[in-house]
Amino acid sequence: MGEPAVEVCDLVKRYGATTAVAGLSLSVEPATVLALLGPNGAGKTTTVEICEGYRRPDSGTVRVLGLDPVHDARELRPRVGVMLQGGGGYPGARAGELLRLLASYAARPLDPAALLDRLGLTAVARTPYKRLSGGQRQRLSLAMAVVARPELVFLDEPTAGLDPQARHATWEVVHRLRADGVTVVLTTHHMDEAERLADTVVVVDSGRVVATGSPAELTRGGAEGQLRFSAEPGLDVVALAAALPAGVRASEPRPGSYLVEGEVDPYLLAAVTAWCAARGVLAGDLRVERRSLEDVFLELTGRDLR
């Protein structure tokens, strides 16, 4: 794919006696979406702020679009969009005015009116920023981050506080950005959002990367799947398990509800249905379940509140 859009190597950042980032490394390929996940205080925001050029690292290297985000800030900033969780708008300025102002600074901006429409903001285009709801400000912040048609955009909790319709509209904007060749780095606490949007997920805890991979890789790696089906109560689950590959377990958690645990693949599915068919048993409601990204996140970072 060529040079990464973002490359962070052995990044360290301290605040007094507290080490916020402790040797973190990650790479973001061009025209992909990377979701940076982690509990509060894990070092996500500090890492992103260093990539944006707002903070200087204590050690390590950061390259964004091949440039140093601090020393090459003048050259880099026109090519990068940044969405903040809060702020960024003049209280008395109208939503449409803000977006048109930012568009006027760009060489090839997106159409502000079309962007407002895509994010459901046309009706409030003439509303002062200070009178927008929290969700409307959030969507306007996204529009402001992308209207200049950046090559790379950082999105900080892009759907925090949004209703389902607004979340889906935001996701569609992210999908379009990726399709247009824009690289997206987002932080989120919504695991379903990361699963839906990200090509790559990086999980950070205590300032270090603890896992990297696609959502499918992270939810599959080291995990046993679950195959569930319903049938008449009292099937011989010991005999069922014996007919399946070694290490696969079978149980009847509730009368008539069966659970097969192990590495779920087409062969296991065929073995279960063949065993049932040989006994004249109709397996109903057959479904395969795997652990979710949230399951993986909690396994990696723990369940304690931060």
Image (spheres, rainbow, N blue to C red):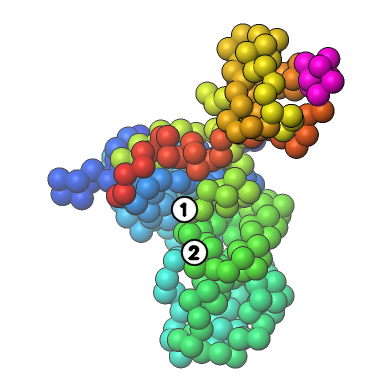
Dividing the picture into quadrants, the one containing residue 288 is top right
Q: Is label 1 in contact with label 2 (beta carbons under 8 Å)?
A: yes
What's under tag 2, amino acid-wise?
Answer: Ala
Q: Which residue appears farthest toward the front when viewing the image?
A: 234
Q: Secondary structure at mark 2?
A: loop
- Residue 10 included in the magenta stretch of the image: no
The residue lying at 29 percent from left, 38 percent from top is: 22
Side of 167 where 113 appears, left or right: right
Q: Nearer the viewer, residue 138 or 109?
A: 138
Report which residue position mark 2 lands on.
160
Side of 21 where 106 appears, left or right: right
Main secondary structure of the magenta stretch: helix
In the image, residue 55 above or below residue 283: below
What's under tag 1, amino acid-wise?
Answer: His
Dividing the picture into quadrants, the one containing residue 224 is top right
Q: Secondary structure at mark 1?
A: loop
Quadrant of the snapshot with the N terminus = top right
The residue lying at 64 percent from left, 32 percent from top is: 255
Q: Residues within 10 Å of mark 2 (few under 14, many from 20)?
A: some
**Mark seen at residue 189:** 1
User: What span is colored magenta in the figure?
Assistant: 273-281
One can see residue 298 in this view: yes
Dot 1 or dot 2, earlier in sequence = 2
